[in-house]
Amino acid sequence: MNPETSPFSPGQPVPIEFFIGRIREVERLRGMVRASTQGKFRIGFVSGERGIGKSSLASFVRYLSEHESQVAGCHVFLGGVEDLNEMLRRTFDRLLKESMDKPWHEQIRNFFGNHVRQVGLFGVTLELNLQESDWSTLAHDFVPTVRRLLNEIKDQKRALFLILDDINGLAGSEVFANWLKSTVDEISTSQQKMPLCILVVGLEERRQELVSKQPSLARVFELIDIAPWSDDEAMDFYRKSFDAVGAKVADSDMRQLVRFTGGLPVLAHEIGDAIWRTAEGPEIESKEVWEGILTAAEVIGRKLLQPQVFRAIRSERYRSILRKMSGAPRMSFGRSELMGRLSDNERKVMDNFLRRMKRLGALETDPEVKGGYQFPNLLHMLYFWIESQRISR
Ligand SMILES: Nc1ncnc2c1ncn2[C@@H]1O[C@H](COP(=O)(O)OP(=O)(O)O)[C@@H](O)[C@H]1O
Ligand SMILES: [Mg+2]
């Protein structure tokens, strides 16, 4: 079918009407934002595996808050950012840009005064023109600056909802960790109200890294950990998406889809989209569903995993091991158990294979079981599993 009409959006934020599940998390985050509109400062950390829907959740809550609570939202993507000044630059730049078509734009612009520069061919893009030393000052004066800014826009907006997404690079920065801690302290020791809600978004490992730089941060965040979708939620997702374009998938095929998705939204979109492209017409056949699943695995291997993992798994030497690796999707397995299933020739390369996968981060030793291995996350597990299914057919 025509890719243009696909109801799936791999690699893109999900359209609001296709947002599935996460009811508890949405409620908690909404509660935090609501509290901030009453002047109570809130800070949370949204964690979860890659592709589980952290950014989508944050963006969905932002949409709701802007529409129901008169909140100014600002979603900053910090992938690759490693220092505090750059983080602040991106944050305020984003704020300025996102306000452009909003009624409070004038106030924001006035706030930055002659530091705002028009750029781009037609001068339609705005940029903040500040020196490195200005950003350092801003880091120091962050709390009063945000207060003043909120005061400027208070007729239109009751609070600021700041999403610091993908803090991977920053999590290793002691300067950032200390700044965050002292910002939180400054707010909580002052007697004034602070209508600000900050949401930090990243992998759980990053949160731990951040806390290791500044241990007292451990108590600061409200934690929101995103779990995989339940089977019902995944089913709901596929149903809604296929229904929206009048496509039909048999119940038994739908169950297969749910099984292969493993609760990972990122996989659901890839699989759905691959099926859509494969399908000849709106009555989708089992064969097309299956083909879609296998194509999606290939796409995921290329797009989301390290190229070396993808290549190694595709290499002749390792394929026969892979074929025998798993009958059912599982997060862990034992070395001896795998060995028992292999031929002499396969055994010879097995340890190489395991070592190589470990080095590439696609496998880890299971700390609880001697000779045990585990996948570092769902995505790797599902990918290995789908690949093993592909070869076994
Ligand atoms: N609740 C959801 N409902 C529908 N699709 C979702 C949902 N959460 C995430 N997705 C989709 O899954 C993919 C990965 O989501 P994303 O938010 O980027 O994950 P993360 O930020 O955790 O890596 C995107 O294509 C997104 O559209
Ligand atoms: Mg993200």
Image: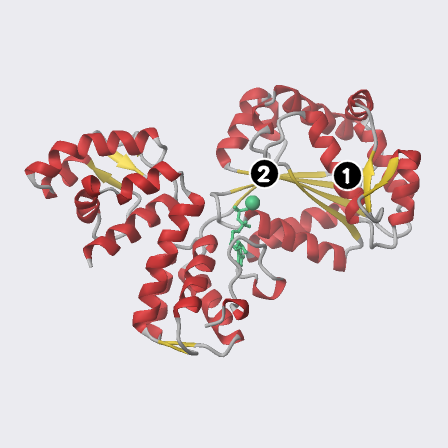
Which label's residue is closer to the chain start, 2 or 1?
1
The residue that appears at 17% across and 34% down in the rendered structure is 350
Q: Which quadrant is home to the C terminus? A: bottom left
Where is 305 relative to 184, above or below? below
Whole-angstrom CA distance, mark 2 to mark 1, is 17 Å
Where is residue 358 shown, x and y percent of the image? 31, 31
Q: Is residue 356 left or right of residue 149?
A: left
Asked if residue 314 is positioned above or below residue 26 in the image, the reply reads: above
Quadrant in which residue 108 is drawn = top right
Give the labeled residue for mark 2: 166
Residue type, numbered disc 2: Asp
Secondary structure found at label 2 = loop
Q: Residue furthest left?
A: 344
| Viewer-side residue, 154 vs 171 | 171
Q: Is mark 2 within 8 Å of ligand 2?
A: yes
Residue 179 image offset from top left, x and y in percent: 70, 23
Is any atom of residue 38 visible in this view?
A: no
Foreground residue among 292 and 139: 292
Badge 1 is on which residue? 93
